[in-house]
């Protein structure tokens, strides 16, 4: 199977269970949004996939090959991390040379082209770059590697709006010409809503949902009106949360819409991905 398969992964830190028997797959050829609040277990799982830490139970398979401490998967996956794992005293152009020696799939010419588009000064040392340009360097490396699975962990940390837009455009253009699996772990959900195809939402060490963005947005909606009317309408609905503003009440519903009673003043609107995420994780989901 062409996929990253996460099978019954559990990870504990003393008396805290960061991941609790987690199982799902990142299939080949899709762009995923891997979402979760701080402390949900998202970064822990990414680090297990990248072989930076190890699970207490379960296993990871990449194209049916066991990932743990296995050089067979070296050219299959790359994880761009928000943590700085590079020699800070080394110049960017020298980083490119070393990465080129370490990865057969690294395209150094492509890396230089990407760096030029971002105005990344490759003669500077890593530690001389701003936080934004350190992220740009790491993005450049990830995009210049021709591996089938790429994980971007908080990829736009420190980037201004122009650079974020440039990254998303370049990522989509590259994906169109070089299909692979792209996994974006981010808190900027609305920015990636039009890029990602499928959402995996993790909370308190468990997977809350895995669904296509299209399906989620089709089945999620907001109903607004006076409190009594909202309460009556929502009696048999799958409500994931409420907001109250003055005398107005808003209900966030997942499921098929039903007709309002005749003469009703209730109104519906679309629920965006950000609001869906907030309501599902507000109290640990339901």
Image (cartoon, rainbow, N blue to C red):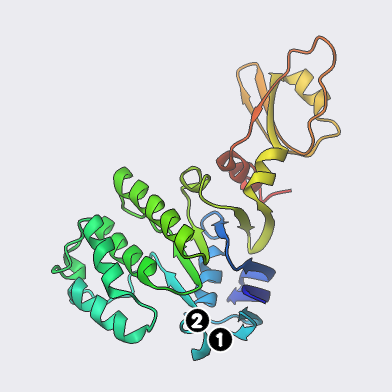
Placement of 220 over or under 265, stated as above or below: below
Task: Name, please, the residue furthest toward the top.
Answer: 263
Which residue is depicted at the point 30% across and 44% down?
A: 162
The numbered disc on residue 51 is 2
Q: Secondary structure at mark 2?
A: loop
Say whether residue 170 is left or right of residue 90: right
- Mark 2 and mark 1 residues within 8 Å of each other at the beta carbon: yes
The N terminus - image quarter: bottom right
Q: Which quarter of the figure has residue 263?
A: top right
Say whether residue 117 is left or right of residue 219: left
Which residue is depicted at the point 69% across and 55% down?
A: 209
Camera-side residue of 283 and 180: 180
Can residue 199 be seen here? The reply is yes
Placement of 284 over or under 230, stated as above or below: below
The numbered disc on residue 68 is 1
Can residue 130 be seen here? The reply is no
Q: Which quarter of the figure has residue 257?
A: top right
Q: Earlier in the sequence, mark 2 or mark 1?
A: 2
């Amino acid at each position: 199977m062409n996929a990253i398969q996460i099978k019954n992964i559990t990870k504990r830190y003393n008396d805290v269970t960061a991941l609790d028997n987690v199982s799902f797959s990142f299939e080949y050829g899709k762009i995923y949004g891997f979402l979760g609040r701080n402390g949900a277990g998202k970064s822990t799982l990414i680090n297990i996939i990248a072989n930076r830490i190890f699970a207490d139970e379960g296993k990871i398979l990449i194209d049916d090959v066991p990932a743990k401490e296995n050089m067979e998967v070296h050219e299959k996956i790359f994880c761009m991390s928000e943590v700085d794992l590079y020699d800070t005293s080394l110049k960017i152009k020298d980083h490119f040379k070393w990465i080129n020696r370490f990865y057969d799939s690294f395209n150094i010419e492509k890396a230089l082209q990407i760096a030029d588009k971002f105005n990344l000064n490759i003669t500077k040392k890593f530690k001389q770059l701003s936080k934004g340009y350190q992220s740009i360097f790491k993005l450049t490396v990830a995009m210049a590697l021709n591996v089938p699975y790429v994980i971007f962990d908080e990829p736009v940390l420190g980037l201004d709006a122009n650079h974020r837009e440039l990254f998303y455009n370049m990522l989509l253009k590259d994906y169109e010409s070089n299909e692979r699996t792209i996994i974006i772990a981010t808190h900027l959900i609305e920015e990636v809503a039009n890029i990602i195809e499928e959402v995996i939402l993790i909370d308190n060490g468990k997977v809350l949902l895995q669904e296509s963005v299209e399906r989620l947005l089709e089945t999620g909606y907001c109903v607004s009106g006076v409190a009594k009317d909202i309460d009556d309408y929502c009696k048999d609905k799958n409500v994931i949360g409420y907001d109250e503003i003055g005398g107005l009440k808003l209900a966030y519903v997942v499921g098929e819409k039903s007709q309002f009673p005749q003469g009703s003043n209730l109104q519906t609107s679309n629920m965006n991905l950000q609001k869906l995420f907030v309501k599902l994780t507000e109290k640990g989901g339901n």
